Image (cartoon, rainbow, N blue to C red):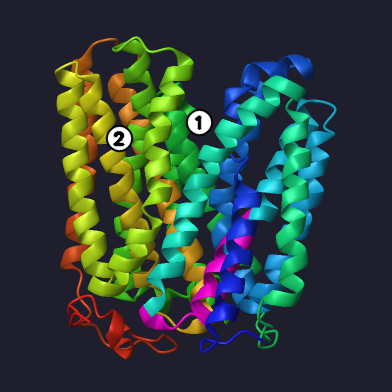
Amino acid sequence: MPTAGDPAARRRVLLTCLTAMFATTFTATLLTVSLRTVAEDLDSSVGVISWSVTGALFALAVAMPILGRIGDIRGHRRTFLTGTAFAVVFSAATALAWDATSLITFRILAQLAGSATIPASFAMLFNVFPPQERVRPSAWASGVLSGASVTGLAVGGVIIDSIGWRAVFFLQAGIAIVPLVAAVRVLPRDHGESRAALDKAGAAVLALAVFTLTFGVNRAAAWGPKPIVCVLLAAAPGLFWLLVVVERRSAEPVVPLELLAARDVRAAGGTSFLLCSAHLGNFLVTPLLLQGVFGLSVSLTSVVTMCRTLSIALAAPSASWLGTKFGPRLLAALASCVYVVALLILAFGARADLLWLVIVGLIVSGLAFGHAQPPLIVIASNAVADGSFGLVTSLQQTAGQIGGVVGTSLLSAVVADTLEPGPFAVSYLIAAAFAVLAAATVLLSTRRSPAIAGLTPMGTVPALDPDVTPAPR
């Protein structure tokens, strides 16, 4: 059984988790480059087939906290194995889809199954790595999740053009089998199934609240102030209030309110929300800038934007080292500040019609984001007991996804269909404001809060104290 004192065992666990996360996520947005091809093959429309992407992303945002909690209760190894096994099955089923409905259904199920590996992987990695080294696996995991999308778009596009889109999902199923087999021997045994039962009422209200908020914000940008949009957005606060009421009355809440009372959990979640609002918002508008203002082709736009995503993955080694040396809070704050600078570069490059400067801004923003995300996960995880690792990491992911919906909806509304550089510069400045708030949120949050029952306060992990810089070795 791998232990924190066995470096070789830790590396095997890390490699297995990274492989599984890559295998189950690299097709997440792959179909965006082949919507028309798939629609023609299945005798459908681009608008309908696009729900195989957006529907899966909505399902992921809704289910992630619940899957994290299931891992905490039933065991992360068991959740990992089950999720990976179903991801193999539904990936193969996607390749055999016979119409649009079956494609959308199998893609959503495959994404849900694969997403179970993410909080389970983070939880197991944090259990086998000592606290002072947790930024390292977090950085590598974040890098792999970012690099997976680059690989999917680059390699997947070639495969789709040469032998068809179905082959990509057969390939995904084949790759996912590798970590599934390795996990049986490599992953640490669960300490025993918890006697706690999943709070089904809380899970249902949580899922409905997250879906109402994310879908309402997303459709507001597409449909405008239609009645259904207004109803969704008006209902979201009431549903979150209902969640608090339900969880207070539950003996085993799906989201323990005392967990949310931990200041570092709130700070990390808020920072992730703001940073992802900035990141995913400008991630959406940049291709519009490159094509509409600079006149780049679709293929050249893909190459340029991949520079940013690739730089996120390349940030993993330095994020690992810097997080261990300076502590997660300082690293997250500094990276958020660098992200502000990157957005200002993008704004100036758009306004001045300087493509090379826009490319520089994209690379810098990718490096900054790649250094900011891993320490935020560590900050939140170090604030809770081991039994809540799955839930707190999944909540962190969900906060970022909701922020991404808000950012993309807001900035896409700012640029609309314009071909002028001014609105793009304004959108980058709005994103920069989000990043400034993100830096302030993580930097100004303090550890001076009373210990919370059932949670492990940050003060018990002095090696990761973000307010103290370790002495150089």
Asked if residue 443 is positioned above or below residue 385 in the image, the reply reads above
Q: What distance separates the C-alpha of mark 2 from that of mark 1? A: 36 Å
- Point out the stretch of residues depicted in magenta: 115-132
Q: Is residue 212 magenta?
A: no
Q: Residue at x 41, y 69 (%)?
A: 136
Residue 358 falls left or right of residue 114: left
Residue bearing the label numbered 1 = 228
Q: Is residue 384 above or below residue 244?
A: below
Asked if residue 433 is positioned above or below residue 385 in the image, the reply reads above
In which quarter of the view is residue 206 placed? Answer: bottom right
The quadrant where residue 446 appears: bottom left
Dot in front, 2 or 1: 2
Residue at (42, 41) in percent of width and height = 310
Circle 1 Cα neighbour tier, 10 Å, few/some/many (<14 / 14–19 / ≥20):
some
* Pick the front one: 445 or 125: 125
Image location of residue 463, percent across then percent down = 29, 84
Name the kind of residue labelled 1 in the image.
Answer: Ile
Q: Residues within 10 Å of mark 2 (few under 14, many from 20)?
A: many
Q: Label 2, on which residue?
A: 362
Task: Kindly identify the amino acid type of the residue bearing the numbered disc 2.
Answer: Leu
Left or right: residue 241 versus residue 127 is left
Q: Dot 1: what SS? A: helix
Residue at 35% in and 47% down: 276
The residue tagged with tag 2: helix, strand or loop? helix
Q: Where is residue 135 in the image (x, y as percent from the top left)?
A: 38, 69
